């Protein structure tokens, strides 16, 4: 049975764009916290006595939990109300940030970061769902998603700069204290400007898929965990082999459960559509490239070249600049011509940025480093709007929460994998050897850019989205919605 959604009340143009601004502020928090910690990792390691593997968990405890819970949070928002879940996520995120700032040990910090991920999971898909349902016109929605993606991209790229300044001035705990005033401001703005969800009288709500949720979380946790711990336990050790088997078993069980569920957590039939599958794969690639580069950059500049956290963060300013300038442009291109053109630009610039650093050494010229970061930032800026718009278009409006959740899950999976791979490459490596050890990581960044070029081919013809109210922008008709079992 397909769940029918009550149409949201029509808002004025000014109110619609105000709602977008409020949601974008909350998304800024989620994106910022994904990367702001990176530049402070060396200081956290010194303060809490943690090595590279422990520091990788500080980052990935957040991203793995965030990725694992995004889909169910989107479903909860569709079930219990988007504004309610959104506000709950802000509260949990704010309290967890305070716990991170006060953490006395690495274990407590990792646990608090995981709790942050729980709160963030209630923000990302719900913010996108609110934006999508507030913007009924397809072209206006495409522009709004471009702005939303640009804010999210800016927060990801600006994280190292902000983190470097805070760590240098106030110490590593300040990267968590800074969240408190933003959370309070967002809570007030949501209460004032974000409309309540439409009445759902007479509508059947979807059941929660708890088996699917548990299996998805187990698959992600085991996969990322073995990537982080592989250098310590040995890639061919019995413990590693057991993790491989458990991860594969959990993934297979997840697929089986989802195919049999009348109301699955993630409708796997969507992945039969090349555009949707390509958007999800592209989101993984983009965020794997970004996070691999950010972690390798942080460790290389601070450990090998002896730069301060502020200097290392400032080195990523070209990346932030490229993302900030190109994301709105990408949204405009997507609205006018479709996703293929911006995806081609994203793939080309990302691959070029990675190629610049495949021969990295301890004395690589600073202009080359800055050029590489600029190219990666441009690629990142061009990628988000077409990927997000394509993925959201793959589900009917009543499932906008789940649509945003699947896209955001793919992003965080890419971020977690990028951090895990980068950490595994340089774990236990002396500062003098970090440049050589990081070269495969820059090859990975290049490969992710080339993958985006492949994804662009499945993104459809370069034409504006149809003004038709159909949620399937591919132009064809469908006899059943993805919600129909």
Image (spheres, rainbow, N blue to C red):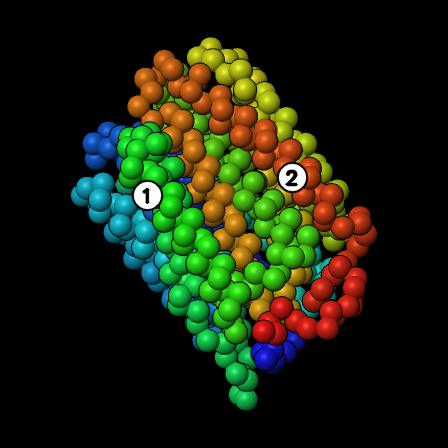
Viewed as shown, does residue 143 lie left or right of 108? right
Q: From this viewpoint, which residue is outermost toward the left?
A: 104
Residue 237 position in % (x across, y down): 30, 33
Viewed as shown, does residue 56 lie left or right of 31? left
Q: Is residue 127 above or below residue 225?
A: below
Structural crowding at the residue carrying mark 1, measured as other residues with C-alpha within 10 Å and reported as few (<14), some (14–19) or many (≥20): some
Residue that appears at 36% across and 58% down = 118
Please count the marks in the image. Answer: 2
Residue 75 position in % (x across, y down): 48, 68
Q: Is residue 409 visible?
A: yes
Residue that appears at 57% across and 26% down = 354
Res 452 label: 2
Viewed as shown, does residue 473 lie left or right of 252? right
Q: Is residue 119 above or below residue 195?
A: above
Along the line of sight, which residue is nearer the eye, 337 or 327? 337
Viewed as shown, does residue 383 lie left or right of 223? right
Res 90 label: none
Residue 159 position in % (x across, y down): 45, 39
Residue that appears at 35% across and 32% down = 235
Q: CA distance from mark 1 to mark 2?
A: 33 Å
Res 242 label: 1
Q: Quadrant of residue 240?
A: top left
Residue that appears at 34% across and 39% down = 241
Q: Is residue 377 above or below residue 216?
A: above
Q: For the residue labelled by badge 1, is the local secondary structure a helix, a strand or a loop? A: helix
Please state which of the two labelled residues, at mark 1 or mark 2, is closer to the viewer.
Answer: 1
Q: Which image quarter is the C terminus in?
A: bottom right
Q: Is residue 351 above or below residue 71?
A: above
| Circles 1 and 2 in contact, beta carbons < 8 Å | no
Q: Is residue 69 visible?
A: no
């Amino acid at each position: 049975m397909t769940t029918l959604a009550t149409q949201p009340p029509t808002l004025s143009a000014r109110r619609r764009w105000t709602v977008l601004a409020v949601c974008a502020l909350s998304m800024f928090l989620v994106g910022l916290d994904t990367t702001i910690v990176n530049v402070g990792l060396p200081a956290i390691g010194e303060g809490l006595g943690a090595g590279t593997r422990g520091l990788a968990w500080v980052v990935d405890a957040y991203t793995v939990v965030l990725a694992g819970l995004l889909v169910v949070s989107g479903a909860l928002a569709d079930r219990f109300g988007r504004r309610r879940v959104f506000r709950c996520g802000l509260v949990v995120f704010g309290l967890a940030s305070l716990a991170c700032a006060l953490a006395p040990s690495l274990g407590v910090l990792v646990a608090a970061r995981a709790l942050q991920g729980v709160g963030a999971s209630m923000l990302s898909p719900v913010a996108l769902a609110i934006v999508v349902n507030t913007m009924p016109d397809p072209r206006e929605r495409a522009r709004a998603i471009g702005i939303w993606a640009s804010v999210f991209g800016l927060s990801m790229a600006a994280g190292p700069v902000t983190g470097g300044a805070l760590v240098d001035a106030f110490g590593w705990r300040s990267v968590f204290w800074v969240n408190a005033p933003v959370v309070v401001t967002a809570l007030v703005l949501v209460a004032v400007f974000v409309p309540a969800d439409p009445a759902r009288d007479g509508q059947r709500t979807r059941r929660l898929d708890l088996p699917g949720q548990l299996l998805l979380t187990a698959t992600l946790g085991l996969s990322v965990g073995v990537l982080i711990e592989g250098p310590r336990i040995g890639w061919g050790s019995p413990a590693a082999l057991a993790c491989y088997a458990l991860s594969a078993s959990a993934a297979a069980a997840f697929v089986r459960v989802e195919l049999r569920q009348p109301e699955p957590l993630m409708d796997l039939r969507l992945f039969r559509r090349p555009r949707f599958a390509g958007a999800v794969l592209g989101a993984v690639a983009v965020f794997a490239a970004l996070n691999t580069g950010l972690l390798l950059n942080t460790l290389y500049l601070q450990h090998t070249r002896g730069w301060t956290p502020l200097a290392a963060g400032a080195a990523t300013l070209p990346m932030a600049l490229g993302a900030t300038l190109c994301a709105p442009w990408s949204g405009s291109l997507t609205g006018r011509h479709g996703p293929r053109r911006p995806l081609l630009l994203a793939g080309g610039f990302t691959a070029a940025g990675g190629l610049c650093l495949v021969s990295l050494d301890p004395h690589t010229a600073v202009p080359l480093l800055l050029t590489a970061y600029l190219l990666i930032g441009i690629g990142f800026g061009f990628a988000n709007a077409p990927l997000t718009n394509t993925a959201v278009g793959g589900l009917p409006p009543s499932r906008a929460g789940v649509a945003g959740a699947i896209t955001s899950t793919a992003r965080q999976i890419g971020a977690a994998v990028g951090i895990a791979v980068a950490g595994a490459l340089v774990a236990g490596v002396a500062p003098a050897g970090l440049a050589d050890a990081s070269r495969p990581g820059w090859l990975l960044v290049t490969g992710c850019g080339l993958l985006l070029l492949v994804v662009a081919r499945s993104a459809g013809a370069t034409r504006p989205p149809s003004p038709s109210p159909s949620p399937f922008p591919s132009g064809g008709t469908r006899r059943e919605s993805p919600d129909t079992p």
